Amino acid sequence: QVQLVESGGGLVQAGDSLRLSCVASGRTIRNRAMAWWRQAPGKAREFVALIRSGDGGTRYQDSVTGRFTISRDNVKNTMFLQMDNLKPEDTARYYCASGTMVVIGTARDEYDSWGQGTQVTVSS
């Protein structure tokens, strides 16, 4: 496992941008898939975006494709989520996740490490 700490959340207006960060410690993320998930009040936690180790291939939830960009800096052991054109429906707590055995990426049990989350609130 690896320890993960998210930051960068906040209260913004629709159409604004935010950049989330996830700093890992304890192990290098170089050989780990990294992902963002989110959970809105009263709803299940849902997959948002994935970036694989190695070739750095990415995958996004359909609702964020074209608006969100996931990236990673293995030297700094950090992952990012650039969120543009935010919508009220993006309001949720955003969690960083990591795993070494990630295949599909959209199942929670593929990940062995989770952060505590950072709150993103988008007003209309």
Image (cartoon, grey):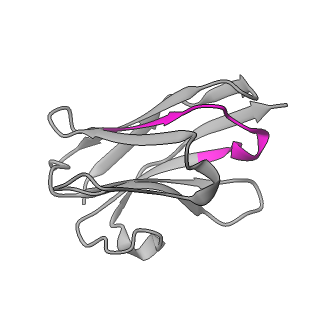
For this view, does 90 lie left or right of residue 34?
Answer: right
Quarter the N terminus occupies: bottom left
* Residue farthest toward the front in the current orientation of the protein: 66
- Give the x, y percent position of residue 108: 46, 71
Marker count (numbered): 0
Q: Position of residue 50 (x, y in %)?
A: 40, 56
98 and 51: which is toward the camera:
51
Q: Nearer the viewer, residue 79 or 2?
A: 79
Residue farthest right in this picture: 124
Q: Is residue 64 visible?
A: yes
- In terms of depth relative to the viewer, which is nearer, 121 or 58? 58
Residue 13 lies within the magenta run = no
Q: Position of residue 53 (x, y in %)?
A: 21, 56
The reply to whether residue 23 is in sight is no
- Please give the name of the residue rendered at 50% of the width and 50% of the height, measured from the top-left corner: 95
The magenta-colored residue range is: 79-93
- Which residue is located at x 47 percent, y 74 percent? 107
Q: Residue at x 67, y 24 (%)?
A: 16
Q: Position of residue 17 (x, y in %)?
A: 60, 26
Above or below, 114 relative to 12: below
**Res 45 → quadrant:** bottom right
Quarter the C terminus occupies: top right
Residue lying at 42% horizontally and 75% vertically, measured from the top left: 109
Apparent side of residue 5 relative to residue 28 in the rendered image (left or right):
right
Verify whether residue 85 appears in magenta.
yes
